[in-house]
Structures are given as structure tokens and as C-alpha cells.
Image (cartoon, helix red, strand yellow):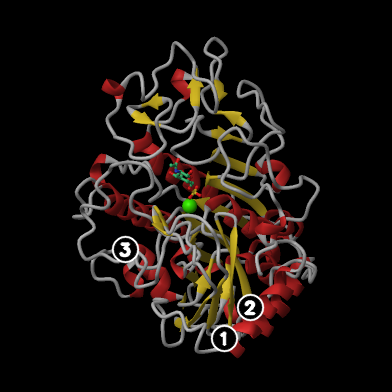
């Protein structure tokens, strides 16, 4: 690849010429890596100016690439957010796109269009490593034989994943549809309703619990950590929580080495800093914030390892890296791990209101960086973008048809920092509710329900209208002072959600 800065049209022309080209030119197409963290907040990286945390490796992506100030996940929780990233469709159009348990069936249509399938079609080898959380199988999964449909049917040639979240059973790695290390004489069973009599659980065996639960998380006790759901068997196959970062970093390195001569697309779903926060011993005490801060230090190390391996393989200048988080941050998410007590002056949302699960901006306004050494000029961008836009944007990059029927917008110039003209509008989802962004304005329709659950939830008694250009922290509801703007936003949101959702009164 030419090491000079390429303009986007030049790049597109180059891609076009490569698409049907010989092996040599195909091998020079840029690799694409999407790093998606779990519950990492806008203020949890030092790149956006936080001085209470240090994330040098993540910051090198931000400072060496396009650093987005106005980027969103589609949802304030993981499954819907990841669904939108993979399919390019708003998650609220699929009623199954809700936080899934470990035994939930795959929610992506195996026949449907996806980001990895599009990349495969363009000649890329595709891999998914880390957190999956999109379901697998068709219900009643037999963990003791090949699990299908799953990552393969979604379009990944290679996968090594955890089924859902670290706090949910089964606590095993699944590589290409097979539980790693499963043994015929110790079969695995999973149940989210009934406990197994001969297995410890947090309510009957509190003496086995080394990380206390604060909410939920009182079922199977595995590695001393109480989880959601019950599990039996697979004793040798169970992951060791503290080793998970190393385990996936190794898998990432192997994938890079195996595919260094081909164009590849890698989805790397980091499990940090989601609960339970169990960084490896060498990161314990890395911050003054306890397990949550230390898990972020570990996350930063993972990013550094990935970059060092790309550098070692001489792939860094031929690899686009997108870094982001699936939803906003949370302190107490069901374990008493001192996240609240040790937070100090750290602002995990970087001054945004709310957090994970919230209709306020902290739910979905996430860190996003696009890095391509020597091809993308370091810059910051205020353009409104969403992770869901990657499908059509990357399609434009690799000369695949852009699909206007998707909710994804192709914005290569914006993602490469050459244009600040992002989306006009965006519908956001948070724990089954919707809110709306257009221009500088945010609209939060009223919803019943608690005002606070883990974070400030954003259930308002009446419409909330916020002018983010002067009130980034959404402290002033200006609906009453701006009746015309309010009506315009309600009507625009109504059009955007069409008949899918009865969210706008
Ligand atoms: C919630 C869990 C929370 C977390 C979340 C999923 C309880 C009380 N809370 O139900 O701990 O697992 O689901 O998070 O069980 S996400 O980032 O994967 O969406
Ligand atoms: Ca998450």
C-alpha cells in the first residue's frame, strides 16, 4: 500500500481495482479490526481529557486517528447494540434484541445480511474473538456437541467466544461452535430456572462466594463468583476469569499470524470492564479505583498487545482499527466490588448524564476512534455517527454494494475524518425504551418506571428536550421554553420510528 495519505476517492478507486485483482493486490487491501469494549464509558479513556485514568494504548488510537466526540452505540445495553453493529439495522426493529442469557438462541437470521458476510464477500477472512452475546443455537442448546447456528452462520470463518456475558453461565469458551476442553464423561448442562442439587449456588453456599453480589447474581457459584444461571459439569472446560484477557489476546495473535497474508476482518469483543471485574493479578492495584479501574488498565494492555503484534507482523499501516464500546458505563452492576466507593473524582461518563441502561446520553454516547496509520490524518470529529453505520461505510470501502434499505449510513469521508457531515438523526434504545437525537437536540419521551436503577435511568414524567450544544450534561429540560422545537422533534421522531414502536405519544 502506498504510504502517502490517500484521498477517499483515490482509496475507493484503489479498492475497486483491488476487488477483482490478483492475490498480490488482494493481499494489500486494508485489514479491518473492530475492537468493542463492554461498558466502557466516554470518560473512561484519557483520550477525551480525563486525568483520573490512564489508557495510553487506547489513546494512541485516538490521537493517531479520528477521535469522535459525538459517536453513539445503537443501544444502552450489549445485545441490541451488537445486533445493530452486525446487521446495520436498528435493534428495536427486532423484538428479540434484548439482553440475552447464555442459553438464548441466535437472534440474527442465518440467511440475513451481516457485516462479516459483506466482508467475506469482498474476499476477507473473518474472525470473532471475545464477547458474543447474540445468542447461539435454536433453543435447548446441547453444549456437548457442535453448537449451531452461531458465529459461523453470521459470517465468521473463525470464532472463539463466550456465549453471553462473564456473569452468565455457561462459563466456557466456544471455539468454532465447540466448547473448548469439553469432556465426554463430564457433560455440561445449563439451566436459567432450576438449580442443580449437587452444584453450589450463592444462596445455599455463601461460604464459597469470594465476590459478593449486590443485585441478582446469586445463582451458580463458579470460581468463587456467583453468576446468573445454573450450570453443571464441564469442570475442566470452565474458564478462569483472571486469565480471560490473556486467553483472548493469544487467540487474537494467532488469528493475526494465521491470516497475515490475506485481507482479514476481526471483531474483537473485549470483556472489560463489565462485571464481574476480575483483572489478572498483574493489574490488581494498577489504579486507585479497585477492580473496575484495574480492568480498564487490563483492557488498555490488550489493545497494546494487539498493536504490538500488528507492528511486529508489519501490518499496522495496512490495518484500519475501529475502537469503541457497546454501551455506556456503570459502577454497581450487581456486585459489591467497590466500584462506587473507590470512584474518587473519576467521571466515567465524562460529564454526560446517565450511564448504561439510560435514556440520557451516558447510555449510548460512547468513545469511538478510527485509526489507520499513515492513511488517516489525526483529527477530532464532531460529526454525529453510530456504530451501526459501519456496515454500509465498510461496504463502500471494500467496493461492496451499499444497501440503502438498512438503517446504516455509508459515511466513509466522515469515518476517515475528511468530512464533518455526519448523520442528521438517530433513534437510540435503552432497556426497551427509545429516545431521539437530531442536530444539537435530544428528545426523551416520558416513560413509567424507576428514576434510578444502577444509573440514572432517564424515565421522565413529561417530554425532555435538551440542547446539547449548550447543555452537554442534559441538566436543563427546555421543552417548555421551546414548544415549536419540541413539536418538531416529536414529529421527526415519530417519522423515524414509524410503526415499529409506540414510543412517542
Ligand atoms: C443485567 C445484569 C447486569 C449485566 C446486564 C447485561 C443483574 C441484576 N444485572 O441483567 O449485571 O449482566 O444484565 O449487561 O442481573 S450487558 O452489558 O451485557 O448488556
Ligand atoms: Ca455492555
Mark 3 burial class by Cα count in 10 Å: few <14, some 14-19, many 20+: many
Label drawn at residue 55: 3
Residue found at x 45% / y 82%: 380
Mark sitting earlier along the chain (3/2): 3
Q: Is residue 139 left or right of residue 449?
A: right
Up-down: is 135 above or below 385? above
Q: Kindly report the distance in space between the C-alpha atoms of the residues bearing marks 3 and 2.
A: 31 Å
Q: Residue 177's x, y, as percent?
A: 64, 33
- Residue carrying label 1: 418
Q: Can you tell which quarter of the image residue 225 is in?
A: top left
Mark nearest the camera among 3 and 2 is 2
Mark nearest the camera among 2 and 1 is 2
Q: Quick one: 408 or 7, which is closer to the camera?
A: 408
Mark 2 burial class by Cα count in 10 Å: few <14, some 14-19, many 20+: some
- Residue carrying label 2: 425
Q: Is residue 237 left or right of residue 505?
A: left
Mark sitting earlier along the chain (2/1): 1
Amino acid at each position: 500500500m502506498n504510504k502517502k495519505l490517500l484521498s477517499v476517492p483515490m482509496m475507493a478507486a484503489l479498492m475497486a481495482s483491488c476487488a477483482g485483482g490478483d492475490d498480490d493486490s488482494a493481499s494489500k487491501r486494508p485489514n479491518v479490526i473492530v475492537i468493542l469494549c463492554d461498558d466502557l464509558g466516554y470518560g473512561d479513556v484519557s483520550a477525551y481529557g480525563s486525568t483520573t485514568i490512564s489508557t495510553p494504548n487506547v489513546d494512541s488510537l485516538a490521537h493517531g486517528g479520528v477521535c469522535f466526540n459525538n459517536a453513539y452505540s445503537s443501544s444502552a445495553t450489549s445485545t441490541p447494540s451488537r445486533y445493530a453493529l452486525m446487521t446495520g439495522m436498528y435493534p428495536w426493529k427486532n423484538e428479540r434484541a434484548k439482553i440475552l442469557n447464555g442459553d438464548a438462541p441466535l437472534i440474527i437470521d442465518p440467511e440475513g445480511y451481516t457485516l462479516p458476510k459483506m466482508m467475506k464477500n469482498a474476499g476477507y477472512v473473518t474472525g470473532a474473538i471475545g464477547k458474543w452475546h447474540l445468542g447461539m443455537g435454536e433453543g435447548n442448546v446441547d453444549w456437548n456437541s457442535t453448537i449451531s447456528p452461531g458465529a459461523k452462520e453470521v459470517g465468521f470463518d473463525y470464532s472463539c467466544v463466550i456465549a453471553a456475558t462473564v456473569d452468565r453461565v455457561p462459563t466456557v469458551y466456544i471455539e468454532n461452535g465447540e466448547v473448548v476442553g469439553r469432556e465426554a464423561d463430564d457433560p455440561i448442562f445449563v439451566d436459567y430456572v432450576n438449580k442443580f442439587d449437587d452444584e453450589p449456588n450463592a444462596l445455599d453456599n455463601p461460604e464459597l462466594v469470594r465476590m459478593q453480589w449486590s443485585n441478582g447474581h446469586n445463582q451458580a457459584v463458579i470460581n468463587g463468583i456467583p453468576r446468573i444461571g445454573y450450570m453443571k459439569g464441564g469442570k475442566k472446560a470452565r474458564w478462569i476469569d483472571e486469565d480471560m484477557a490473556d486467553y483472548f489476546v493469544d487467540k487474537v495473535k494467532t488469528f493475526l499470524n494465521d491470516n497475515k497474508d490475506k485481507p482479514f476482518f476481526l471483531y474483537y469483543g473485549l470483556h472489560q470492564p463489565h462485571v464481574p471485574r476480575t483483572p489478572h493479578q498483574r493489574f490488581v492495584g494498577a489504579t486507585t479505583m479497585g477492580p473496575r479501574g484495574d480492568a480498564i488498565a487490563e483492557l488498555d494492555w490488550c489493545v497494546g498487545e494487539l498493536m504490538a503484534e500488528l507492528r511486529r507482523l508489519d501490518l499496522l499501516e495496512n490495518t484500519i482499527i475501529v475502537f469503541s464500546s457497546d454501551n455506556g458505563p456503570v459502577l454497581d452492576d450487581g456486585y459489591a466490588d467497590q466500584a462506587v466507593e473507590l470512584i474518587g473524582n473519576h467521571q466515567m461518563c465524562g460529564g454526560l448524564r446517565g450511564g448504561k441502561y439510560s435514556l440520557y446520553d451516558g447510555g449510548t454516547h460512547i468513545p469511538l476512534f478510527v485509526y489507520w496509520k499513515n492513511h488517516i490524518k489525526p483529527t477530532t470529529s464532531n460529526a454525529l455517527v453510530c456504530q451501526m453505520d459501519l456496515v454500509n461505510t465498510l461496504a463502500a470501502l471494500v467496493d461492496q454494494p451499499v444497501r440503502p434499505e438498512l438503517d446504516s449510513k455509508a459515511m466513509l469521508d466522515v469515518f476517515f475524518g475528511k468530512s464533518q457531515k455526519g448523520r442528521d438523526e438517530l433513534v437510540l434504545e435503552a432497556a426497551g425504551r427509545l429516545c431521539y437525537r437530531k442536530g444539537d437536540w435530544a428528545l426523551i419521551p416520558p416513560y413509567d418506571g424507576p428514576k434510578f436503577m444502577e444509573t440514572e435511568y432517564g424515565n421522565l414524567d413529561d417530554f425532555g428536550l435538551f440542547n446539547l450544544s449548550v447543555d452537554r450534561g442534559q441538566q436543563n429540560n427546555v421543552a417548555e421554553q421551546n414548544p415549536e422545537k419540541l413539536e418538531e422533534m416529536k414529529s421527526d421522531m415519530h417519522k423515524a420510528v414509524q410503526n415499529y414502536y409506540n414510543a412517542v405519544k
